Image (cartoon, rainbow, N blue to C red):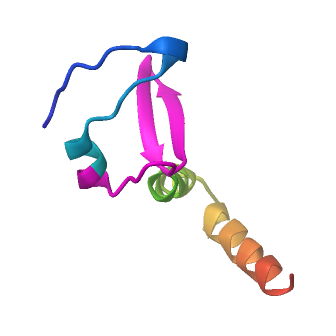
Amino acid sequence: MNRTPVKIGEGGRIVIPAEYRKALGIDIGDELILHMESGKMILLTRKLAIEYVQEEMSKYSVNGRVLSEELIAERREESKNE
């Protein structure tokens, strides 16, 4: 299941084979995030996209502070107050 050829269909659609959808826990109608990186097209579930951004942001710290962790904490606090 490492490589499977797919074709671009009408309207630029790509069919994700069932075995891939099952392995990733993707159902019909789920929203995915398309990401371009170094000339590669990467398709992520929302959960994986969030993890990816968190991982990338964790590389940045200011005076020992991890800004991504602070941002996440702020967002969680804001959502509690909604």
Q: Can you give x and y, in whole percent of width and height, for residue 16 in the image?
A: 33, 34
Of 70 and 35, nearer the camera is 35
When the figure is inspected, residue 28 is found, relative to residue 61, above or below; the finding is: above
Residue sitting at 43 percent across and 25 percent down? Answer: 41
Q: Can you give x and y, in whole percent of width and height, for residue 42 in the image?
A: 42, 32
Q: Quadrant of the N terminus?
A: top left
Of 26 and 43, nearer the camera is 26
Of 67 and 71, nearer the camera is 71
When the figure is inspected, residue 39 is found, relative to residue 73, above or below; the finding is: above
Total labels drawn = 0
- Which of the 4 image quadrants contains residue 77? bottom right
Q: Can you give x and y, in whole percent of width and height, for residue 22 in the image?
A: 26, 53
In the figure, is residue 3 to the left or right of 26?
Answer: left
Residue sitting at 40 percent across and 53 percent down? Answer: 27
Asked whether residue 32 is drawn in magenta, I would say yes
Q: Can you give x and y, in whole percent of width and height, for residue 73 in the image?
A: 69, 77
Q: Which residue lies furthest to the right in this view?
A: 82
Q: Quadrant of the C terminus?
A: bottom right
When the figure is inspected, residue 8 is found, relative to residue 76, above or below; the finding is: above
Residue sitting at 28 percent across and 20 percent down? Answer: 6
Q: Magenta residues?
A: 22-45
